[in-house]
């Protein structure tokens, strides 16, 4: 039942001695999403103990190289290691050219299907749905077509409170009705209310990923109440102009979104190589949103099951 | 006057926790050649203190991804960092597709010329010539068209022995003649011989790079007498069959080439991830060629000036 964000590549466009460019893993109840896949992503996966074989989905936020140059090497390794399980890739439409290039020039030996879904959204759009969770893409405000992602557990089925089952002699039909959210009216006129007889076993967890983007009004609404908000913070207050010019965010911008959205935690990353010490960005963000953390390689931001 | 090989990426097709795939730097009297450029090459350059800005030439041995997936990310970084100096790339002809793809989809902001020279050779072929050195490409024996590279300092101009200049009252014309290698016959019939009056200030240094290849008869001849021979040793004796099947070499194969060529030092690399401890490969090679060393990230195999 794990629900976590692992930060791997935490640099912006140019990797540094310490940081590779963007790569992150969302673990949604055991299902792994690789979110952005910069050069070296497969190396980061390996050295942080995450098997590439377990990656089922790759989500690419936009088509700048520092978010996708790791895809071809990763696909090559998957092929060399004999992968047969299909791989699902979600990215802006022009990513088809990368996949075609890979197939044409490096596709020998690929024995698995690559299923590509082009992203297109002007507001949150469902792109993935499983038995327990959903993923949505939503547009960001960058120089090129860019998407953020929202990962949400589904609302759980209601549980009927055990103490009433025997006490009131609930029938299977009555239990089913209550679990489905419908009050039961018995023949004697008594009402078994959903509110009294059931409880929600847990509150659904959620996480959002926002990189790269300049601030824009709708974003906080789209990620409202997420437990973990990853938001880029390429720059600090000292480079606010540069940040605007390149359609990026400052640490303060990221913190403002987290505060407005009522997020649980904010994780900032995508740091410019201009900041050898990114604690300055952490400090700026924490002044606005204290529950801010730095994305560092191998950090796991786990959201425990939220039982009521 | 540095002449050295720096090994950076030392794994074969699949990088490991410890090793990136192929990337090496030849420093030929201050001129840097990046030889093969796997995923993460720019990261290896940075963390080993080699500025990508100083790379003038990239040589790609063949078009398998583990020898070239680092090119696009490196070019992107060069562009982001404002490079204007031309970059020369030598690779098998079909590499033009990678360059076209890069230009079409990731070439915005590139302000430097990329000059591509397709490799084609059935025997050692001059591909680069500067004031002091030359580089040759020669064919290897791999599954696809593959080239090795030979780096050679030019023969130096002869120096006239200082002690004779005053003693025999050498004229400028006589000095020029001797330096050019021609004996001087004076009017009195006396002969100033090149052999007696001059000396070679140093013996030219050389290094060769051979990856990937199965053994073949001409190779030792083509790299005869090199000071440093880099030769792949993907496998050990235990996987000799696999080595042949994939047109690779074992450590013993590499050592045999070094011994037959009379190389100064052998550096083995391109290790299969099947060998968590590559000392077994070192041991096998040293039984045949004792002056064998392991390619490890950041190792510099320097050839000092060889004064006579």
Image: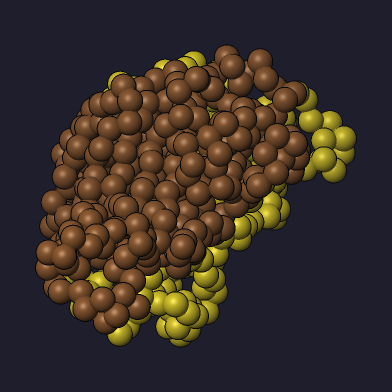
Chain colours: A yellow, B brown
**Residue drawn 16% across the image and 45% down it:** B115
Give the number of callouts.
0
Nearer to us in this view, B297 or B15: B297
**Residue A297 visible here:** yes
Q: Quadrant of the N terminus of chain A?
A: top right
Q: Quadrant of the C terminus of chain A?
A: bottom right
- Residue found at the far right of this picture: A166
Nearer to us in this view, A206 or B293: B293
Nearer to us in this view, B267 or A223: B267
Q: Position of residue A281 (x, y in %)?
A: 43, 78
**Residue A158 visible here:** no
**Residue drawn 39% across the image and 20% down it:** B144
Q: Position of residue A202 (x, y in %)?
A: 66, 49
**Residue drawn 50% across the image and 49% down it:** B227
Task: Indicate whether B188 appears above or below B282.
Answer: below
**Residue drawn 18% across the image and 60% down it:** B189
């Amino acid at each position: 039942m794990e629900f976590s964000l692992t930060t791997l590549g935490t640099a912006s466009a140019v990797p540094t001695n310490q940081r590779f460019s963007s790569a992150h893993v969302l673990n949604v109840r055991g299902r792994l999403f690789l979110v952005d896949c910069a050069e070296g992503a497969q190396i980061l996966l390996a050295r942080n103990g995450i098997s590439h074989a377990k990656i089922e989905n790759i989500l690419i936020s936009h088509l700048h190289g520092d978010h996708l140059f790791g895809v071809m090497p990763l696909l090559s390794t998957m092929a060399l290691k004999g992968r047969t399980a299909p791989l699902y890739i979600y990215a802006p439409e022009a990513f088809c050219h990368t996949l075609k290039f890979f197939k044409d020039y490096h596709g020998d030996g690929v024995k698995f299907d690559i299923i590509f879904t082009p992203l297109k959204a002007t507001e949150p759009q469902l792109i993935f749905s499983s038995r327990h969770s959903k993923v949505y893409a939503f547009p960001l405000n960058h120089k090129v077509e860019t998407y953020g992602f929202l990962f949400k557990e589904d609302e759980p089925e209601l549980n009927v409170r055990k103490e009433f089952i025997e006490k009131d002699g609930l029938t299977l039909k009555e239990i089913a009705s209550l679990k489905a959210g419908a009050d039961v009216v018995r023949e004697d006129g008594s009402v078994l209310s959903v509110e009294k007889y059931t409880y929600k076993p847990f509150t659904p967890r959620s996480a959002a990923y926002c990189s790269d983007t300049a601030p824009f009004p709708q974003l906080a609404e789209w990620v409202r109440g997420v437990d973990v908000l990853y938001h880029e913070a390429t720059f600090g207050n000292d480079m606010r102009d540069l940040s605007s010019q390149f359609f990026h965010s400052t640490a303060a911008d990221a913190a403002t979104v987290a505060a407005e959205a009522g997020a649980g935690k904010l994780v900032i990353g995508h740091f410019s190589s201009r900041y050898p010490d990114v604690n300055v960005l952490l400090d700026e963000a924490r002044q606005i949103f204290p529950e801010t953390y730095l994305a560092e390689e191998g950090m796991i931001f786990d959201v425990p099951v939220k039982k009521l």
